[in-house]
Image (tube, rainbow, N blue to C red):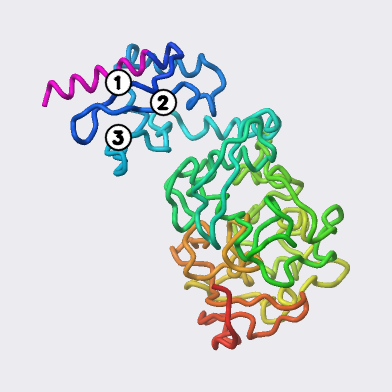
Amino acid sequence: MEARRLAKRMYQGFCLFLLGAGTAVSFLTLETATGLPAALALTTADCRVCHASGNNVDRHHNLIITKGLDCLNCHKQVLDPVTNTYVFAPFRDCTSCHSTTVHYDKHGLYIANWPTMSGVAPGTAPLWTQVMTFSLVNPAKYQYQVCYKCHSYNAFGAAPTGVSPVVSHSVINLTDQAMELNPYNRSAHPIQVSLNSQTGSYAPKALVSNQMSLGWTNVGTQKMVCSDCHAAPASGSTGATRYLLKGPRTYWPYNRNGKLWTLSDVRNNTNNWSTDLFCVNCHPMYSGGSWKNNVHGDGDHLGSSYTIGGLRLNGIPCVSCHVEVPHGYRLSRLIGYESDPAPYGTIQSNGTKAQVLKGFKKASSPFSYSEGNCYSTAGACGDHSSPKMTYDW
């Protein structure tokens, strides 16, 4: 056994030496499940998909000498049942040595220079299913292709609910953005395709023009980019630190006082909603004395006190109906259900969910909603306690 382990370490050391020297090692052999050597197709080009500098690759591969490490300290291996060999898993456990701020602090660089960087183009997947196939695009054709390199199955692997095991700088689990922005979902911001081309959505697919701010009124056919909503945090910023939000309004889903945004804030013009609420960068919601849909303006939603999940709240929170991560979702109009996992479902301070819905059906127009379009058994939603139609999956 010790002889086999020593041989394996020798193979790894030789691998390290060749990679550091810039040598392709397509014929290098490693120990297999059967104890027989097998081919491992690995080259320095694999590392340089993300790291263009050869110095960076060489520096890491020199760790066997300077730190007594080897390949498997950073590059995990799993058994491939088809070839019966051990191969490198897609995820590199960089956080074993590096803090999560390393790449977080470089987002401004990624955003500014994305046309010169490589990206990945996603394959297809059904409604609310992880995209598991990606092809390298170098240089990237679209900004989201650079984002998908790290914010998808391409980097962190299986996450069937869309929630990965990787904890972000905002102290939430990263979610699969390629899954969220999938054109086969019921709703998504128009990053990959325009709203009229959102295959999984049903009519009406787009909002109407007066539900959008100037510059975004060409509804249905316009597309946007990730940096319309995200940017590197400004020095000394507070609201934008969470989720790297961008714009004159950067607070979501909490206001600057740490309370969830509610429709009562909008109705009563409190907590500086018009200058702080992130969604208002693009969605006016309420202007000129009128609401932009009859749901937000419904009197039952504008009361000053509700009990949700055992907590007394000043108005109905936005996230009682909508998902906290608003890239795209399995339900229409970015609606979330009480069964949704965090961070799509917002967890309140007492550990209960802020979301209350069990069913939702998109109406034919912004002012055609009735009590039957929503279903909930929460005490605060007595008018919606009986299902009255077929709701979104």
**Quadrant of the rendered structure where residue 62 is?**
top left
Label 1 to label 2: alpha-carbon separation: 12 Å
Q: Is residue 196 left or right of residue 133?
A: right
Label 3 to label 1: alpha-carbon separation: 13 Å
Mark 1 is surrounded, within 10 Å at the Cα level, by few (under 14), some (14 to 19) or many (20 or more) other residues, namely: many
Q: Is residue 378 left or right of residue 202?
A: left
Q: Earlier in the sequence, mark 3 or mark 1?
A: 1
Magenta run includes residue 8: yes
For the point 34% across and 34% down, the residue is 87
For the point 29% across and 44% down, the residue is 81
Count of numbered labels shown in the rendering: 3
Which numbered dot is residue 42? Answer: 2
Q: What residue would you read off at disc 1?
A: 12
Q: Are marks 2 and 3 in contact (CB under 8 Å)?
A: no
Q: Secondary structure at mark 3?
A: strand
**46 and 103: which one is in front?**
46
In this rendering, the answer to whether 178 lies above or below 300 is above
Q: Secondary structure at mark 1?
A: helix
What range is drawn magenta here? 1-17
**20 and 188: which one is in front?**
20
For the point 52% across and 76% down, the residue is 358
Which numbered dot is residue 86? Answer: 3
Q: Secondary structure at mark 2?
A: loop
Magenta run includes residue 372: no
Q: Which of pointers 3 and 1 indicates the residue nearer the eye?
A: 3
